[in-house]
Image (cartoon, rainbow, N blue to C red):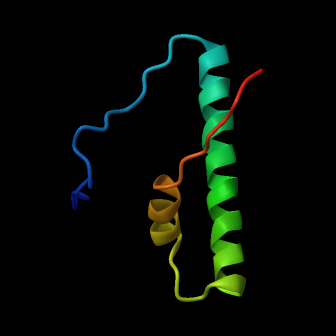
Amino acid sequence: MALIPQPNTSLRPVQHQTDARIKAHTFVALIVYCLQVTLKHLLLTLASRLTTWAALEKMAALQMKVKTP
């Protein structure tokens, strides 16, 4: 059996205690996957040389200023 190396060894499986938390985690994971696939599709049509991870790294540097009344 071949072992697949993990890129970040600090990540551990998430242990949820309730069904609600399991459902919430699954929902969030699905939303993240949908956003990643959508971003990949948009990048292929608009910026074919930019990878999904490169775009995410560029977006990480963005900051939004929000003023509350």
Quadrant for the N terminus in the image: bottom left
Q: Residue at x 67, y 35 (%)?
A: 66
Q: Residue at x 50, y 18 (%)?
A: 16
In the image, farthest residue toward the right: 69
Q: Residue at x 53, y 54 (%)?
A: 62
Residue 48 at x, y = what percent?
60, 88
Q: Where is 1 relative to 27, above or below?
A: below
Q: Is residue 54 left or right of residue 48?
A: left
36, 69: nearer the viewer:
69
69, 23: nearer the viewer:
69
Q: Residue at x 32, y 33 (%)?
A: 12
Q: Is residue 46 left or right of residue 11?
A: right
Residue 63 at x, y = what percent?
54, 47
Q: Where is 41 relative to 11, above or below?
A: below
Q: Where is 29 relative to 44, above or below?
A: above
6, 44: nearer the viewer:
44
Residue 18 at x, y = what percent?
58, 11
Quadrant for the C terminus in the image: top right
The total number of labels drawn is 0
Q: Is residue 49 left or right of residue 1?
A: right
